[in-house]
Amino acid sequence: MSQHPPSPRITGRAWGRIDVEGYDSFKDVKLYPGGARAWRWEETGTSHAPGVQFVDVEELLAHGATVVVLTTGVLGRLKVQPETLQALAEQGITVFVKRTPKAVQLYNELRETAAVGALIHSTC
C-alpha cells in the first residue's frame, strides 16, 4: 500500500489547457501528491529561457514528490535550468524532462506507483 496520497490524474490536454481530475482546467499546472494548483510563472520570475528554476519545483518536493516530471512545452520552447537538474539530483530526486504530450503520458503512468510531481506547460 502506498504511503503517499495519490497525485491527481491528468484527464485531458489541449493547446492552452490541462484538465485535472477533481480540479478546474489549468493553462499551466503544478501537480504533486495530494493536489494540484495553477503554475503561475510570475510568482518566481520564470520565463521560457533560461527556464524552469529550482524554486518552481520546491513546492512539489514539499508535498512529498520523490519523482518529478518537467515539461519543455508542446514545441520544446521551455528550457530547464541546469542548476535545477543538479539540485534535484543532489536531493536524490528522479527527474524526467519531456515535451508536454510525452510528459503527460509519463506522469499519468508514474502516478500509479510513485510519489510524483510535475510542472506541465500547455503551450509553446
Image: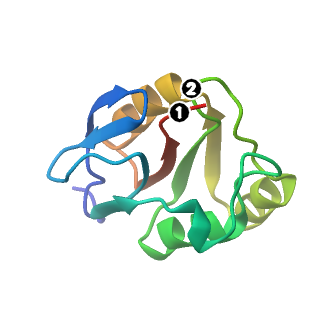
Quarter placement of the C terminus: top right
Q: How crowded is mark 2: few (under 14 residues within 10 Å), some or many (20 or more)?
A: many
Task: Identify the residue position indicated by label 2 in the image.
Answer: 74
Q: Splitting the image into 4 quarters, where does residue 108 fall?
A: top left
In the displayed structure, 32 sits above or below 17; it is: below
**Could you tell me residue 123's position as x and y percent?**
53, 33
Q: What element carries label 2?
A: loop
Q: Do the residues labelled 1 and 2 touch (CB within 8 Å)?
A: yes
| 1 or 2: tag closer to the N-terminus | 2
**Residue type at tag 2:** Val
Q: Splitting the image into 4 quarters, where does residue 5 fall?
A: bottom left
Can you see residue 33? Answer: no
Q: How is the image coloured?
A: rainbow
Q: Is residue 112 left or right of residue 51?
A: left
**Could you tell me residue 91's position as x and y percent?**
69, 68
**Residue type at tag 1:** Thr
In the displayed structure, 115 sits above or below 124; it is: below
Quarter placement of the N terminus: bottom left
Task: Identify the residue position indicated by label 1 in the image.
Answer: 123
Please state which of residues 51 and 63 is positioned toward the viewer in this rendering. Answer: 51
Query: Among all residues in the image, which is located at the extreme left?
Result: 22
Q: What element carries label 1?
A: loop
